[in-house]
Amino acid sequence: MKTKILSGREVSKFYKNKIRENILDLKKKGIIPGLAVVLVGDDPASKIYVNSKSRTCSKLGIFSKTLPYPNKITQVELITVIEKLNKDKQINGILVQMPLPLHIDEFEIINRILPEKDVDGFHPENLGKLVIGKESFVSCTPAGILAILKYYNISVEGKHVVIIGRSNIVGKPLLNLLYQKNDFGNATVTICHSKTKNLSKITSQADILIVAAGNPNMITVDMIKEGSVIIDVGINRIKDKSTKKGYRIVGDVDFEGVKNKVSAITPVPGGVGPMTITMLMQNTLEATLRTI
Ligand code: GUN
């Protein structure tokens, strides 16, 4: 069986071209989408993500501003920042980079973002709408996974989809997207997590296996069904002295080990990763379109 490599880079390019065209049309009407990114502290990974988001914005014609704050910012000060952005007409989307320092209540901060500017899809109103099948902003990684499946015409209807990981950002929104009674839903979904017993018994029943555990190479060939589709959400840095940087990036799935047994698989890097920022751009465009 020839294994299909599901290229997030290719899907991302396809979406970005469409987003760029839409933004050009808006510009003709004098409208420029705006995204504000709030960055608290100096976590190196967060800085990399935030820089990458602002670079992508400028490539697509989205106005973006990054608001950096020191780690010691108080909850009240941060809420003031959010409320100012809520009122700012130039800003259509607000993203607060996670994680936040421990003295700040993440839930309270997310809760203060206007739901119509919540391009991360983290606000309880957007999550609630997702659960009951109403249109809402959907968290970018789950939206990106769905975009990959759609692009490659992989239907989830009637399939057994197994998700490993129950985070608010990936596992929970994905579960709620996939079982919905709509054109791209109707899957039977199982959620597994760190306390799941007999994990391989469940994963080996999956027609589509989506792994978001943050555990390098945890899924091995003996754990999967022949001909299944594998979506690897993991981005793990592991030591590798043979590379210039001294490390390399691997997913949660042993790609080389499983690739000849599956019908399709996302690589790491170049799979789900590139889709996350692209979906953020898509959500920012949507947020802008909803204001006109
Ligand atoms: N930290 C890691 N992933 C994300 C994300 O998708 N959005 C935000 N705001 N922070 C993150």
Image: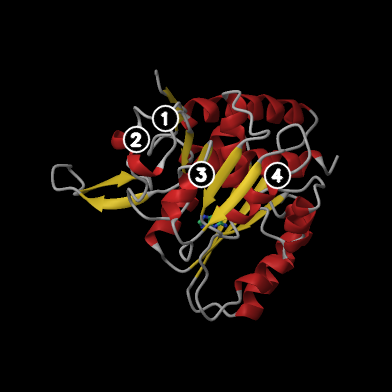
- Give the residue at mark 1: 262
Which secondary structure, mark 4? loop
| Quarter of the rendering containing residue 267 | top left
- Mark 4 Cα-neighbour bin, 10 Å: few <14, some 14–19, many ≥20: many
User: Three-letter amino acid code at disc 1?
Assistant: Val
Relative horizontal placement of residue 227, taking residue 185 as reference (left or right): left
The quadrant where ligand 1 appears is: bottom right
Secondary structure under the numbered disc 3 in the rendered image: strand
Q: Residues within 10 Å of mark 1 (few under 14, many from 20)?
A: many
> From the image, which quarter does the N terminus lie in?
top left
Residue found at the far top of this picture: 2
- For mark 2, give the secondary structure: helix
Label 4 amino acid? Answer: Tyr
> In the rendered view, would you say 120 is above or below 100?
above
Mark 1 or 3, closer to the camera: 1
Q: Name the residue under label 4.
A: 179
Q: Name the residue under label 2.
A: 258
Q: Which of 81 and 98 is in front in this view?
A: 98
Residue at (65%, 43%) from the top-left corner? 188
Q: How far apart are marks 3 and 4 (CA)?
A: 14 Å
User: Which amino acid is tagged 2?
Assistant: Val
**Distance Cα–Cα, label 2 vs label 3:** 14 Å
Disc 2 and disc 1 in contact, CB within 8 angstroms: yes
Q: Which kind of residue does numbered mark 3 sit on?
A: Ile
Which residue does the image show at 37% across and 45% down from the upper left? 251
